[in-house]
Image (cartoon, helix red, strand yellow):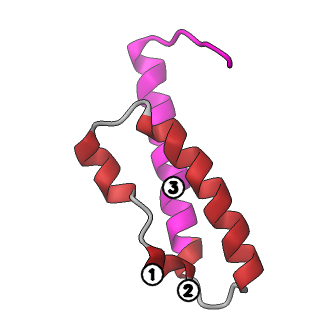
Amino acid sequence: MLGILLNDRETQEIDYLLRKELDEMLMDLKDMKLDKQMKTAIEARYKVIFRMYARLASPKQLSKYALNRKYTK
């Protein structure tokens, strides 16, 4: 396990980066052109990024990014 100390500005920047990455992956999961194997890989990465974001975000903010199974079909 790694530890890191961040000031408020750095925390806001990481929060922003993680949200944008989650948004991009959600758009990719909605894309009907991608095959199932690609979506599975994106979903695995999404789960890792989501867990990172969960350490910074409030439950209300997290609910927006909770992965719905409809994206992976």
Closer to the eye: label 3 or 1: 1
| Side (left or right) of 49 relative to 33 | left
Q: State the quadrant of the C terminus.
A: bottom right
Specify the amino acid type for callout 3.
Answer: Leu
- State how far apart marks 3 and 1 are (Cα): 16 Å
- In this figure, which residue is indicated by the disc labeled 3? 22
Q: Position of residue 65 (x, y in %)?
A: 39, 57
Residue 73: image tag:
2
| Residue 27 visible at all | yes
- State how far apart marks 2 and 1 are (Cα): 6 Å
- In this figure, which residue is indicated by the disc labeled 1? 70
Q: Residue at x 69, y 71 (%)?
A: 40
Closer to the eye: label 3 or 2: 2
Mark before the other along the chain sequence, 3 or 2? 3
| Side (left or right) of 28 relative to 38 | left
Q: Position of residue 30 (x, y in %)?
A: 52, 80
What range is drawn magenta here? 1-27
Specify the amino acid type for callout 1.
Answer: Lys
Specify the amino acid type for callout 2.
Answer: Lys
- State how far apart marks 3 and 2 are (Cα): 18 Å
Q: In the depicted view, which residue is nearer to us: 13 or 66?
A: 66
| Residue 17 visible at all | no
Q: Determine crowd level at label 3: few under 14, some 14-19, many 20+ residues with C-alpha closer than 10 A.
A: many
Asked if marks 2 and 1 touch (Cβ < 8 Å), the reply is yes
Q: Residue at x 58, y 56 (%)?
A: 46
